Image (cartoon, grey):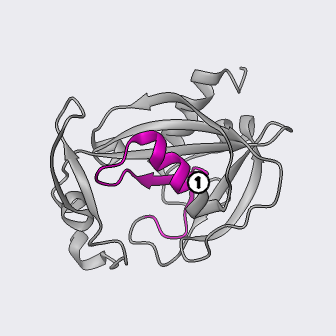
Amino acid sequence: MTNLHEIYQASDTDDDLLPVVDEHDVPVGRGRRKDVHAQKLRHRAVHVVVRNRAGQVLLQLRSHRKDSHPGWWDISVGGHVDVDEDYDAAAVRELREELGIVAPMTCVARRGAGPESGWEFVRIYECTHDGEVPFHRGEIDAVRWVDAKDLISFGHSNAQGDEWRVTGSGLLSFHEWAHATGAVKS
């Protein structure tokens, strides 16, 4: 079995400070991003599903330089809530930073902190965008629009590298989004 420290890839965000929260999502301190992740401390994150008027959702291909899940497809936007920032402000900031998009959004679902979320309390937002996507090339290698129903049907989070390999947390958030909004009918 490979030790996680042996495969860890340093990130330029390792020293970012994150709020550490308790089991009720109440702040109890702060810590460096790298330490918070290594110690599996509860913290906060936002996921944003960007959809277009055609009913497609945007996927991002995580940069091959990322410290976790490099080269995997992921939710449109994902990021941490900073110290002294609330979820809504973090969602607006992350959407602008990662995709270069400014758009109104709505919080549609929440996920609790546990192993499947990387110990993150996650709030899931939705917005609509039909223009260019001038994504941040340091964090993202590519973006693509996919049919939401196809993503829910074919998306998987196993180790096979194909067009439907999506991070487990991102895939869970897509499912929560689809359920909360009724975006994908059976």
Percent across and percent down for residue 51 are: 73, 41
Q: Give percent across and percent down for residue 172.
A: 49, 38
User: Would you name the residue on which mark 1 appears?
Assistant: 95
Q: What residue range appears in magenta?
A: 69-94
Does 111 sit above or below residue 42?
above
Q: How many marks?
A: 1
Q: Is residue 140 left or right of residue 119?
A: right
Secondary structure state at the residue bearing disc 1: helix
Q: Which of these two is toward me, 109 or 157?
A: 109
Q: On screen, 63 above or below 119?
A: below
Say whether residue 165 is magenta. Answer: no
* Quarter that holds the C terminus: top right
Q: Residues within 10 Å of mark 1 (few under 14, many from 20)?
A: many
Where the N terminus falls, by quadrant? Answer: bottom left
Which residue is rendered at x = 16% and y = 37% of the image?
22
Percent position of residue 135, x then y: 66, 67
Note whether residue 65 is visible: yes
Residue at image coords 72%, 67%: 134
Q: Is residue 77 magenta?
A: yes
Q: Residue at x 24, y 51 (%)?
A: 19
Looking at the image, residue 181 sits to the left or right of residue 134; the answer is: left
* Amino acid type, label 1: Leu
Q: Pick the residue in front: 29 or 62.
A: 29
How far across and how far down the image is residue 33, in percent? 26, 63
Q: Residue at x 30, y 76 (%)?
A: 7
Is residue 1 at least partly visible in the picture? no
- Farthest-out residue, front: 84
Above or below, comparing residue 156 to residue 12 in the picture: above
Q: Is residue 26 left or right of residue 122?
A: left
**Residue 89, relative to residue 178: is it above or below?**
below
